[in-house]
């Protein structure tokens, strides 16, 4: 009678795989800003070394010299040097040696032993946007208060969430960094996947069109090569996709999307407290667990007693019939469950599906027995009063 695959034994992705592997030494690239000190060129001999304070959040020591930025073609223009130096892919130490060579050997502008200091002042950054729909649980919860209890449910596709624009430093421009800076890993109200809308589209309007499609429909469709999907959990036997470094590295114009999951709720009625309750995302919920969430007692299944409010009859004989009303192939079907048998047979404790209605009720013989015992108890009490 199980209707879908299990949730509680899905494998979870190792979140370290969402972080890029940085090189042992920082490699220079376009838009890096350097502090360059060249003796007798950028400063006089007796001048103090100019100090450049690094930008906030870079964790770099102060730089020394004049700020110079690597051009988009990967070159660096220096004073008095004919033609720029190609520096992309070099370390700071390698660039320092190349500058010394250019001034003292290639063009012989400075004498041998001239002092040159190169330091990284501001790493290049990548501007990305992170759209998250997994807001706080209290912000997405609908509550229904009644005299007999309360039902709660998470509702998906709420017109709420956050959108943040980030500037990520080089070698920190990955999915894990973007998530950590916008609220952490996806919550239980989010889908088990991360979607990346790539900014490097074939035409200038491609990214805008993709973002417009997302906001209009609430989703992204198809196998567009500019869309990267990163699953966070997988079914048993299903291997998680092996993502390359290019898949998790973010670049200018990329949009990271965390979507809220669809509303998955079940309802209760009959002798149970009426309400609407969320179905957990990552583990299975059977009928007994659903009854407990709704405030009902499963003591009757083990032969105990339970309190049922507003029934009009006694509760010496507890109700043991449970109906799960479910839509199957477009028709509503009632699945009858004997709670006593379900306690002994796990196969009868079916998993709850979205939009199930759980109704607890008496069997006819249980109603008759309760009426009889209530009447007998009332007569016994009256006789005791007249003695």
Image: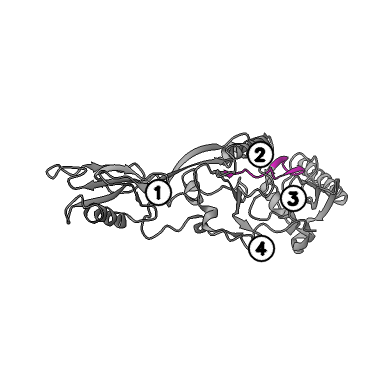
Furthest-left residue in this view: 46
Callout in the foreground (3, 4): 4
Which sits earlier in the primary sequence, circle 2 or circle 1?
1
Q: Nearer the viewer, residue 71 or 160?
A: 71
Q: Residues within 10 Å of mark 1 (few under 14, many from 20)?
A: some
Q: Are marks 2 and 1 in contact (CB under 8 Å)?
A: no
Image vertical order of residue 205 relative to residue 287, above or below: above
- The residue to which callout 4 is attached is 238
Which sits earlier in the primary sequence, circle 2 or circle 4?
2
Q: Are marks 4 and 1 in contact (CB under 8 Å)?
A: no
Horizontal and vertical percent position of residue 62:
26, 46
Q: Quadrant of residue 46?
A: top left
Horizontal and vertical percent position of residue 94:
31, 57
* Magenta residues, start to end: 257-276
Q: Real-space Cα distance between discs 3 and 1?
A: 57 Å
Rendered image: mark on residue 74: 1
Q: Real-space Cα distance between discs 2 and 4?
A: 27 Å
- The residue to which callout 2 is attached is 218
Rendered image: mark on residue 353: 3
Q: Are marks 3 and 1 in contact (CB under 8 Å)?
A: no
Q: Real-space Cα distance between discs 4 and 1?
A: 43 Å
Helix, strand, or loop for circle 4? Answer: loop
């Amino acid at each position: 009678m199980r209707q879908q695959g299990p949730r509680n034994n899905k494998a979870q992705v190792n979140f370290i795989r969402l972080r890029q592997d940085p090189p042992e030494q920082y490699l220079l690239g376009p838009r890096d800003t350097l502090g360059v000190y060249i003796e007798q060129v950028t400063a006089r001999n007796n001048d103090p070394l100019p100090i450049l304070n690094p930008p906030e959040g870079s964790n770099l020591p102060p730089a020394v010299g004049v700020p110079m930025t690597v051009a988009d073609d990967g070159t660096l223009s220096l004073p008095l040097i004919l033609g720029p130096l190609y520096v992309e892919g070099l370390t700071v130490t390698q660039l320092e040696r190349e500058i010394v060579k250019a001034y003292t050997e290639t063009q012989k502008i400075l004498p041998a032993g001239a002092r040159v200091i190169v330091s990284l002042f501001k790493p290049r950054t990548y501007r990305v946007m992170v759209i998250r729909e997994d807001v706080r649980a209290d912000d997405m919860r609908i509550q229904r208060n009644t005299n007999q209890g309360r039902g709660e449910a998470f509702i998906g596709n709420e017109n709420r969430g956050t959108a943040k624009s980030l500037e990520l430093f080089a070698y920190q421009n990955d999915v894990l960094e973007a998530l950590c800076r916008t609220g952490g890993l996806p919550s239980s109200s989010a889908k088990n996947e991360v979607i990346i809308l790539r900014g490097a589209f074939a035409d200038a309007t491609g990214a805008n069109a993709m973002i417009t499609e997302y906001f209009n429909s609430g989703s992204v469709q198809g196998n567009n090569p500019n869309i990267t999907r990163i699953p966070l959990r997988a079914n048993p036997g299903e291997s998680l996709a092996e993502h390359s470094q290019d898949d998790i590295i973010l670049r200018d114009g990329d949009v990271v999307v965390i979507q809220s999951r669809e509303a998955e709720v079940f309802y209760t009625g009959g002798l149970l407290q009426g309400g609407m309750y969320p179905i957990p995302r990552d583990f299975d919920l059977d009928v007994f667990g659903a009854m407990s969430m709704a405030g009902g007692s499963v003591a009757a299944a083990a032969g105990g007693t339970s309190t049922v409010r507003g029934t009009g009859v006694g509760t010496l004989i507890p109700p043991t019939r449970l109906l799960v009303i479910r839509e199957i192939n477009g028709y509503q079907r009632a699945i009858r469950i004997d709670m006593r048998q379900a306690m002994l047979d796990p196969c009868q404790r079916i998993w709850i599906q979205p939009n199930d209605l759980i109704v607890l009720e008496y069997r006819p013989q249980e109603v008759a027995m309760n009426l009889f015992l209530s009447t007998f108890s009332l007569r016994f009490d009256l006789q005791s009063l007249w003695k």
